[in-house]
Image (tube, helix red, strand yellow):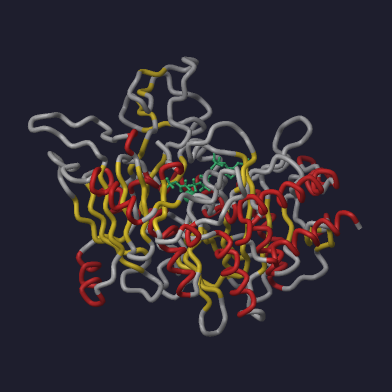
């Protein structure tokens, strides 16, 4: 029911290619490495006979529009019908892809088994899997993915996190592009000087609001939002120096709980047909339900584990990481250019996580380097999308910590080098935080559709407005008059939402210094240390 990070490996001849050296006595948290020999042995012990008694599906798929210049092909072998059906939704599957592969012979080899062979006549479990033996392994050099024992989304739909992010990011470093855990959306502001639709990407950790922002239903009148993608972006600078992005996926694998006609009406319309639901509850008339879908709870349900459920029984009806899997074409606000093989032009990159304290609603980076530093220092409260427990604030640099296909220090160098190459045309970088809490414990910002107000400010900055911000130690922040708060003025404690308490930030600087030293060590580019020193100086000035 969630990704298993502790059993996820990247296999390269040298360890340092995959992960930075952590300090003595410290557990590295930026990925797991396995030697090619050890992985060979694993495969030899786990795979022979593992699909016995099941149907093996051969799934040729394309990430990105079939044959497009930014697209890539794969073939997944799987013994799970759930995987075959879900891949059909999440990627472009079919003989056209095979024709494409026949032309250049290039494809990522994806092998998946639930790891539960059947003796002759034996009935399959309803949800076959082999939790003790789970492994999700990647070989970037030969472009292979090997996954055993889990049927869940990110562990088994191998086009998604395994290919589009882990193999993708490793390829991207070699080929000069970026594979990122980012949504892509378009927004047209009624006041835009050129009347243009402008595009932004946003990197938020798992279960931190990408799908919600990508399908935003703006509360401001006259604003028009379109969705290009909700989870992954492949980005490349074109000959003109514009940063172009495509969504390599073909559907949405979104968090179900909390999705409702109030919070995300666009998602609700998207999942009305041709949708696969995982670990949600079932209503008596065969429909689906999850916490937060309706204000009133149904009187009776079958919960996600198959047990009877009634209100007040003390159990959750749906798993907190239950998901819908719906084709992109169902989305009523899908962008006209969503399949443009050249991608859409990106003008702003947003980073954000669940930060209950200290981090303002929005700030703009002072430079590309400062923006890369913001991504490197990204943190969030733990969510249900991985096996972590509790509400600890954890590091999730670039929202990619579970998905780096190579050494994070080299990833930072790659981002910095792109900044040096394209100085004239770089998108602006912002940090946002919908999740700051007040003294009473509630969210300080209403979020969801109201986030359009923040995007409005961001896009005005992109248009060049220089009289709508003031300098703060964490970057440029909006002046109060500059953000449209019409209708919500009395809900918003502006000063609290934008305060940057000195003690909090000096602690943050120290914590980041320790984190970088312990986790990234000698792989850390010096630009990041310089940014950290400057941040500290701004607070001590
Ligand atoms: P992955 O698919 O795991 O990568 O997640 P995601 O980043 O797409 O997150 P998603 O949009 O599904 O949101 C996850 C949770 O965050 C849901 O419970 C939402 O209700 C909640 N959420 C999203 N946007 C906001 C917001 O603006 N404010 C608040 N308070 N909660 C939000
Ligand atoms: C995430 O956890 O970021 C997801 C869900 O998008 S999964 O596909 O399982 O990785
Ligand atoms: Mn995700």
Instruction: Residue at 54% x, 61% y: name it.
Output: 185
User: Which image quarter holds the C terminus?
Assistant: bottom right
The quadrant of the image that shows the N terminus is top left
Query: What's the residue at 45%, 74% (across, down)?
Result: 175
Q: Is residue 398 left or right of residue 435?
A: left
Counting from the top left corner in percent of width and height, residue 443 is at 70, 38
- Report the number of discs: 0
The answer to whether residue 417 shows anywhere in this view is yes
Residue 61: where, in percent of width, then height?
Answer: 28, 61
**Residue 222 visible in the shown view:** no
Q: Nearer the viewer, residue 226 or 124?
A: 124
| Extreme residue toward the front, this view | 24
Q: Residue furthest right?
A: 541
Q: Residue at x 62, y 49 (%)?
A: 23
Out of 40 and 463, give the one closest to the viewer: 40
**Image-based side of 198 in relation to 136, left or right:** right
Residue 218 placed where, x, y %? 61, 53
Q: Residue furthest bottom?
A: 239
Which is more toward the observer, 46 or 498?
46
Residue drawn at (56%, 62%) of the image: 201
Q: Height in image: 381 above or below 63?
A: above
On screen, residue 508 versus residue 162, left or right, reads right
The quadrant where residue 319 appears: top left
Give percent across and percent down for residue 254. Answer: 45, 45
- Residue 280, compared with residue 76, is above or below; it is above
The residue lying furthest to the left in this view is: 120
Residue 489: quarter of image? top right
Q: Is residue 82 left or right of residue 408?
A: left
């Amino acid at each position: 029911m969630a990704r298993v990070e502790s059993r996820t490996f990247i296999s390269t001849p040298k360890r340092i290619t995959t992960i930075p050296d952590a300090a003595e006595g410290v557990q590295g948290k930026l990925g797991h490495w396995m030697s090619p020999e050890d992985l060979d042995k694993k495969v030899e012990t786990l795979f022979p006979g593992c699909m016995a008694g099941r149907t093996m599906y051969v799934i040729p798929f394309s990430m990105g529009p079939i044959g497009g210049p930014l697209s890539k092909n794969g073939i997944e072998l799987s013994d799970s019908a759930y995987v075959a059906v879900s891949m059909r939704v999440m990627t472009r599957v079919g003989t056209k892809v095979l024709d494409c592969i026949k032309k250049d012979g290039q494809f990522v080899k994806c092998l998946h088994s639930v790891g539960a062979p059947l003796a002759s006549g034996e009935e399959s479990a309803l949800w076959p899997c082999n939790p003790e033996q789970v492994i999700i392994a990647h070989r970037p050099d030969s472009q292979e993915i090997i996954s055993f024992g889990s049927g869940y989304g990110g562990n088994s739909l191998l086009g998604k996190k395994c290919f589009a992010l882990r193999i993708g990011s490793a390829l991207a470093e070699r080929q000069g592009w970026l594979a990122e855990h980012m949504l892509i959306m378009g927004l047209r502001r009624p006041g835009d000087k050129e009347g243009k639709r402008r595009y932004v990407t946003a990197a938020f950790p798992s279960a931190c609001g990408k799908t919600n922002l990508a399908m935003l239903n703006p509360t401001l009148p006259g604003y028009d939002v379109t969705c290009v993608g909700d989870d992954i972006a492949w980005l490349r600078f074109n000959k003109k120096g514009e940063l172009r992005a495509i969504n390599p996926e073909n559907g949405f694998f979104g968090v179900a709980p909390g999705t409702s006609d109030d919070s995300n009406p666009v998602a609700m319309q998207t999942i009305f047909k041709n949708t696969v639901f995982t670990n949600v509850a079932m209503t008596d008339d065969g429909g689906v339900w999850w916490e937060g879908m309706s204000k009133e709870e149904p009187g009776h349900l079958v919960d996600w584990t198959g047990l009877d459920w009634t209100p007040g029984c003390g159990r959750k009806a749906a798993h907190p990481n239950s998901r819908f899997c719906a084709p992109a074409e169902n989305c009523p606000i899908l962008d006209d250019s969503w399949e443009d093989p050249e991608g859409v032009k990106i003008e702003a990159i947003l980073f954000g996580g669940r930060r209950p304290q200290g981090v303002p609603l929005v700030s703009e980076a002072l430079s590309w380097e400062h923006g890369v530093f913001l991504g490197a220092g990204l943190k969030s409260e733990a969510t249900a999308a991985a096996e972590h427990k509790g509400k600890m604030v954890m590091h999730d640099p670039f929202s990619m910590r579970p998905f780096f296909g190579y050494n994070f220090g080299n990833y930072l160098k790659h981002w910095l080098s792109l900044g040096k190459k394209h100085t004239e045309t770089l998108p602006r970088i912002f940090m946002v935080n919908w999740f700051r809490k007040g003294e009473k414990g509630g969210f300080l910002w209403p979020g969801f559709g109201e986030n359009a107000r923040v995007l409005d400010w961001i896009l005005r900055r992109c248009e060049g407005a220089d009289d709508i911000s003031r300098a703060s130690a964490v970057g440029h922040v909006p002046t109060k008059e500059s953000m449209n708060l019409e209708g919500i003025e009395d809900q918003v404690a502006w000063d609290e939402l934008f305060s940057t308490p000195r003690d909090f930030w000096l602690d943050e600087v120290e914590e980041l210094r320790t984190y970088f030293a312990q986790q990234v060590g000698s792989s850390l580019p010096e630009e990041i240390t310089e940014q950290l020193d400057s941040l500290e100086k701004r607070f001590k000035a």
